[in-house]
Image: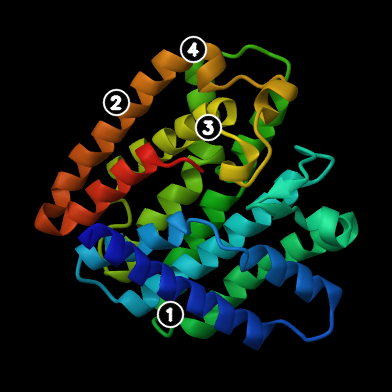
Amino acid sequence: MEFEKQLEVYREKINAELERTMDEYTPKGLIVSDAMRYSLLAGGKRVRPVLALAVCDALDGDMDIALHFGCALEMIHTYSLIHDDLPCMDDDTLRRGRATCHVKFGEAYALLAGDALLTMAFEYITKNVRDSAKAFLYIKKLSYCAGISGMVGGQTDDIKAESERISLDALRSVHRRKTGALIDAAGCAGAIAAGRDENIAAEYTKSLGIAFQIKDDILDVEGDAATLGKTPMKDEKNDKSTFVTLLGIDEAKKELESETKKAIEAAEAFGEKGEFLKNLAEALLKRND
């Protein structure tokens, strides 16, 4: 119960700040602004900004800075979802239980909304984080994690691997970047906000990112649209290599448990303050959406 209460505290802070930011920064009466709000404020688990706050909290850092880093990261995550759903990518029509951005507003406005959220993330950091040294360090890290060496590079290799059977090592490499890079960025956000080595949570986020992706692959097979809030069986339709197709459902579940255990063990480095991080890994293991 204590974990659930703290999780809700974190999420309320994040959602309130995202609402405030969209009210302040997005011009009224523009379709692209409506599209940005529609996607960014659609809810979701807020895993990445929650993780930023949790790591910072465990390190007794500046929670205000961590909040701003985490919200910028959520903008970038949301842009990636908008673009991922486009017809030229996964061509999906359902996200977080409602029509995807391009279905609601058209492809052109969805594309621009994603571009605007990506750009806005960096502007937002410069306007809200007064510690310029920490802001610079995080902008540098976030740019790396979101770009060709991180998320974009992983997405590129994911597209390239469609209709192929790639090795398990290659699949891990794809998802260490496509999914894992922004989770790494969340851990770095908390560490930098606390004035600590940016890689202090790296072992934890590495395992958490892989576990998160394995769970997504399992839910794509076992979940339903009403619970998931998105279209199931998309990986099969797109003929993608996944942890389920390469390992089978039972072995994928064992791998999920193994990576979750690694994350929990890595959280031991934070002592008693790492309890929330352990519980977060467990919660993501058991999630159904």
Please tell me whether mark 1 or mark 3 is closer to you in this view: 3
* Element type where label 2 sits in the image: helix
Disc 1 and disc 3: Cα gap in Å?
41 Å
* Element type where label 1 sits in the image: helix
Quadrant of the image containing the N terminus: bottom left
Looking at the image, which residue is at 44% across and 49% down? 183
Query: Which mark sits nearer the N-terminus, 1 or 3?
Result: 1
Image quarter of residue 79: bottom right
Q: Is residue 3 above or below residue 57?
A: above
Please tell me whether mark 1 or mark 2 is closer to you in this view: 2
Where does the image place residue 224, in percent across and percent down from the top left? 60, 35
Q: Amino acid at mark 2?
A: Ser
Looking at the image, which residue is at 42% across and 73% down? 12
Query: Which mark sits nearer the N-terminus, 1 or 2?
Result: 1
Mark 1–mark 2 contact, CB under 8 Å? Answer: no
> Which residue does the numbered mark 3 point to in the structure image?
219
Where does the image place residue 204, in percent across and percent down from the top left? 29, 43
Mark 3–mark 4 contact, CB under 8 Å? Answer: no
Query: Which mark sits nearer the N-terminus, 3 or 4?
Result: 3
Query: Which mark sits nearer the N-terminus, 2 or 3?
Result: 3
Query: Which mark sits nearer the N-terminus, 1 or 4?
Result: 1
> Which residue does the numbered mark 1 point to in the structure image?
132
> Which residue does the numbered mark 4 point to in the structure image?
248
Where does the image place residue 218, in percent across and percent down from the top left? 50, 27
